[in-house]
Amino acid sequence: MDTEAPERQPNSETYRPDGPAVEVREARPRLVVRTPGRAVNPAPQAIPWRVSRDVVLEQLSTDPYELSYAFVLIPRFEQHELKGDLAEDLHALMKQICMSGGWTLDYLSIHLQYMQWIVRSRVNVSSANIVHFVRSRTSSQILENFPLISQTNLSRDFWAPGYLLLVGREPHPPQRVDEFIRLTRQQQRYQNSHRS
């Protein structure tokens, strides 16, 4: 004996004439601030869609808003070049530091005269905190693992004072890095000439 399923009535709360039954819920109003490609006040629980009076709401991203920073550091002494074992150690150490800090390392470039890297972090992490953490961790490792460097550099900081910062996902142009190096070395010579 064939029995047909009863047809759903149009006034039913789960009725959908063009497809399977879905639960109809009233959408709760909320403030959503939109930025290109991101939504800043995401819903606490992401729901792919809701149907309410023929309105479909898109799913909001649950990723936190992030900023990207491009940094450049140069060694305190010109004769300290970033090459060989030192460059290899820096490469591995930067990956470990960024993972420990909760940042995403998007770019790392180690040249003889400078190190440049780009990280993404949450907006509540300042660029000053990132560069301070990187310089202190790399300095302690370099001075501990390379005794010849620690003999000439008596400070606890392997890096020259200051840093170059750009907010964004692109590396610094080579001309800007060269100018930063020139100005930093010029400032160091000026300070050294006035100390004697």
Image: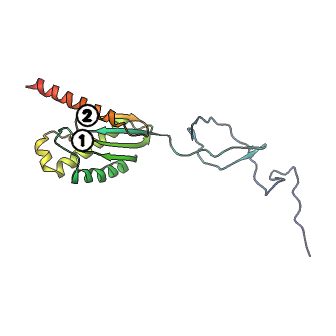
Secondary structure of the residue carrying tag 2 is: helix
Report the number of numbered marks: 2
Residue 101 seen in the figure: no
Read off the residue under disc 2: 181
Q: Residue at x 71, y 47 (%)?
A: 50
Q: Residues within 10 Å of mark 2 (few under 14, many from 20)?
A: many
Q: Earlier in the sequence, mark 1 or mark 2?
A: 1
Q: Quadrant of residue 77?
A: top left
Residue 43 seen in the figure: yes
- Hey, what amino acid is under mark 1? Gln
- Whether residues under marks 1 and 2 lie with C-beta atoms below 8 angstroms apart, the answer is yes
Q: Disc 1 to disc 2, how far (Cα)?
A: 8 Å
Q: Position of residue 114 (x, y in %)?
A: 27, 41
Horizontally, is 11 left or right of 91 in the view? Answer: right
178 vs 96, nearest the viewer: 178
Horizontally, is 49 left or right of 115 in the view? Answer: right
Q: Quadrant of the C terminus?
A: top left
Read off the residue under disc 1: 113
- Hey, what amino acid is under mark 2? Ile
Q: Residue at x 16, y 39 (%)?
A: 155
Secondary structure of the residue carrying tag 1 is: loop
Q: Position of residue 55 (x, y in %)?
A: 75, 42
